[in-house]
Amino acid sequence: MTLSYSSIEFVVNRERCQVSVPPMKRLLDVLREDLGLTGTKEGCGEGECGSCSVRVDGELVNSCMIPVLQAQGAHIETVEGLSKSGELHPLQKAFLACGGAQCGICTPGMLMAATHLLAQNPTPSITEIREGLAGNLCRCTGFVRIFDSVIASIAQSHAGPGRKSHAG
Amino acid sequence: MRGDPQAHQLVAPGTLHGVLSLLAEEPGAWTPIAGGTELMVAYAAGRLNHRKLVSLWGIPDLRWIEVSTDSVVIAAGATFRDLRDHPAIAAEFPLLAKAAGWIGSIANQSRATLGGNLVNGSPAADSSPALLVYDAEVEMISACGRRRAPYREFHIGYKRNLLAPDELLYAVHVPRRNAGQRQYIRKVGTRRAMAISKTALAGRVLLQNRVVQEIRLAAASVAAFPARLYRAEDALLGKAISPETMRATRAALLSEIVPIDDIRSTAEYRRVVTANLLQEFLSSFAPDGTIR
Ligand SMILES: Cc1cc2nc3c(=O)[nH]c(=O)nc-3n(C[C@H](O)[C@H](O)[C@H](O)COP(=O)(O)OP(=O)(O)OC[C@H]3O[C@@H](n4cnc5c(N)ncnc54)[C@H](O)[C@@H]3O)c2cc1C
Ligand code: FES
Ligand code: FES
């Protein structure tokens, strides 16, 4: 069977993009292979680990579970969109400062899940942080440093301009 | 082996009408894909045999929740996130809201649809026991029209259901008449986040002067598909909760469930734990904890 490619347009990290790919290609693979956005990682490839987490139209999703045709017209945010003009996002700084990343495979997904959580709830409790990250697995850190990183980033963003020292 | 994107055709007509016309033209040739959280797992493993897929994602006519005087109607394409967020569901159908929070992670719930859960028809489907105890009805749709059936009749075998090849599940109707009733649901899995159930039990009871006036019980993972526990219900109807009714109900339950051994648990564990869940529910409304 010869199958045609689809022309798909969406907005990735505030930039309009257009790709011509098989419609069943996973959003994860389109981001990595066609757009060169290799920050988004593949862990399990079956929805269990969250390392491929991105935000699509403001919802947290696993990009390994989405055929790219279903992202037609969507607004997509990946880990590459977190830093602004060369400056790391407060969450990224906190992960660096608190040892929230070791091998780094889970980190982009953790950052996106944490970004999503804080977008919905800027001052989550520790239980809410645990729940917000429950779909993201880490084989290295034992999770505590990841939760600490999220807490630190919240403390940082509430510390006010006077204490805006670099966390690293 | 991995899924090969070139081996599958995927189209997105974008409207309900467009999807139904496609299904009518070639009944059985097209497989609907909604949130993809079942089908994409099969695809990733190279196990997706369907060659032609039609997307239901992003079709507004399939994603809504409507509250009328006597029922809440949930479109098949509503996600479990939509269900969790809906005030009427949280207030009146707590079992359904709770089950929605069980369907994998947040990232899974933002894609997983109610229709996909029911049509996939896993014996462990988390939304099923709640819908069974709420006497839900399913509404199916094709280019020829719509029809309704009680949800308890929807599953007809392991992963088999009432849908014709040119039909979609359209909506689920849940009657609003649970005020003053006791409700129960509990899932037993390996861990809290993201584990498929070893067993799950839901119940709803209307008591008058301690006598059971109406009772619904349903379980997951104890038969080829999620099912009502009719014999256990019969053992309770019209009775007051006493140690004897409790024993009879437990025996009735054990006579009707047919769990299996699989990678998640054993048949024996499922029998014992499902009966214990039932006992926990009944004890919660026993007059003075007489139940043992
Ligand atoms: C990591 C992970 C964890 C999970 N955990 C759970 C869990 O704890 N409990 C649980 O119950 N499930 C769980 N699931 C399974 C899955 O998320 C649910 O069954 C989900 O509701 C499926 O919906 P979907 O829209 O994604 O289905 P899809 O994959 O899009 O479709 C599933 C099936 O339904 C058919 N279909 C979909 N919509 C319609 C329609 N309207 N009419 C006709 N046919 C239709 C499709 O053709 C397909 O056969 C999990 C999945 C993953 C990946
Ligand atoms: S790679 Fe997508 S959830 Fe694991
Ligand atoms: S840092 Fe290695 S998996 Fe989390």
Image (cartoon, coloured by chain):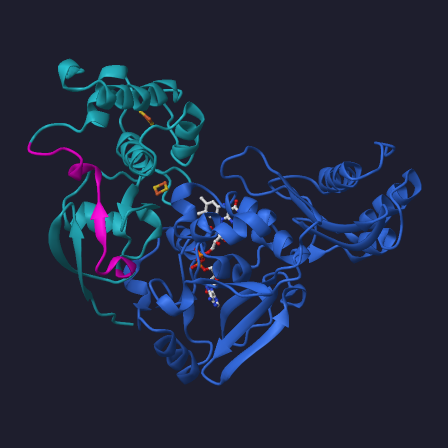
Chain colours: A cyan, B blue
Q: Nearer the viewer, residue B264 or B155?
A: B155
Residue B222, image x and y in percent? 70, 49
Q: Nearer the viewer, residue B149 or B87?
A: B87
**Residue drawn at (55%, 65%) of the image:** B172
Check the image and report above or below for A115 versus B69: above
Residue B207, image x and y in percent? 80, 49
**Residue drawn at (54%, 76%) of the image:** B164
Q: Is residue A80 magenta?
A: yes
Q: Residue furthest right?
A: B244
Visible in this render: residue A65? yes
Visible in this render: residue A165? no
Check the image and report above or below for B266 versus B116: above
**Residue drawn at (47%, 76%) of the image:** B28
Q: Quadrant of residue A111?
A: top left
User: What range of the chain is rendered magenta?
Assistant: A69-85
Quadrant of the drawing holding the C terminus of chain B: top right
Check the image and report above or below for A86 versus B149: above
Residue B80, image x and y in percent? 46, 51
Q: Nearer the viewer, residue B152 or A139?
A: B152
Where is ligand 2, by quadrant?
top left
Check the image and report above or below for B282 versus A87: below
Residue A76 in the figure: left or right of residue B110: left
**Residue drawn at (91%, 38%) of the image:** B243
Q: Nearer the viewer, residue B232 or B210?
A: B210
Q: Quadrant of residue B132?
A: bottom right
Q: Residue furthest left?
A: A85
Residue A154, image x and y in percent? 28, 23
Total numbered circles: 0
Residue B66 in the figure: left or right of residue A75: right
Residue B60 in the figure: left or right of residue B126: left
Q: Is residue A107 magenta?
A: no
